Image: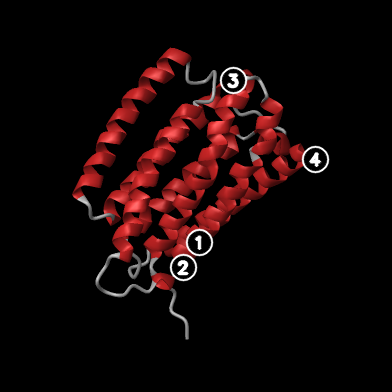
Amino acid sequence: MPTGIYHISALVSILTNIITLLIGIFYCYRSQNPPYMRIFPGYLFISAAVEFFANPDILQLFNYQPFGNHQGYVALALYNLYTPFELFMFAWFLLRIIQSPLIKKLLILSLMLFSLFFIIYSVRTDIGKNMNLIAIVLENVILIIPCLTWYRELFTRSEPVNLYREPAFWLVTGIFFYLATVTPFYLASIYLIGHRLRGLFQAFSSINNISLMITYMLFIKGFTCRIRRS
């Protein structure tokens, strides 16, 4: 039963990703929306592409292996490379909306240290041999701080803000929700994989898929929240 839930949630998550990408292409480049939104269609496209070429559920559904006998190695390498990609994309967005010079400097320093760690770890352990769960946890910790900073700045503004029509609120909430939900899961995953409990790890992986679906829906709200309604 848990495996069935995992496969279904994985497919629905990918479908939601594609729908969010299409909506993002349609809305994120409109003049009434802030420029920082234009990065999200690119992020969503890469996210969908990685899943299409690496996700075993998609590969099994269409009965193909684009990388042949090296499919497993390339899939892990793609997922590992996706971690710094996602980190830098979200960091770029957060650097555009937060005001605190201290947090901006801390975020940039964290990105530099993360990059150094990721390169050394990937070379020493072989990027396509194992999932770099430590990098995922570090990514989450690095991004949670500027998310909380933005919330603090939002609620200390002197002027009122209509959150219903504020794209940054929905986008930050989507990112923060995902990070806060999956961080305990990935911390537990380090233990599960370390003790060779991969079946249990896969069963709990549906948490990640469901969190992604909710995050994508919050992104859609952010993309469309400035639509004029009569």
Residue 194: mark in rendering: 3
Total numbered circles: 4
Quadrant including the N terminus = top right
Separation of marks 1 and 4 at Cα, in angstroms: 30 Å
Q: CA distance from mark 2 to mark 1?
A: 6 Å
Label 4 is placed on what type of residue?
A: Met
Which numbered disc covers residue 224?
2
Give coordinates of residue 107: x percent, y percent.
28, 41
Q: Residue lying furthest left in this view?
A: 101
Residue for point 62% across, 44% down? 207
Q: Residues within 10 Å of mark 2 (few under 14, many from 20)?
A: some
Give the mark toward the camera: 3 or 4: 3
Q: Position of residue 147 (x, y in %)?
A: 37, 51
- Disc 4 element: loop
How packed is label 3: few (under 14 Cα within 10 Å), some, or many (20 or more)? few
> Given this view, does label 3 or label 2 mark the residue nearer the observer?
3
- From where the camera sits, is residue 171 visible? yes
Question: What residue is pinned by disc 1?
Answer: 220
Query: Residue tagged by mark 4?
Result: 1
Q: Amino acid at mark 2?
A: Thr
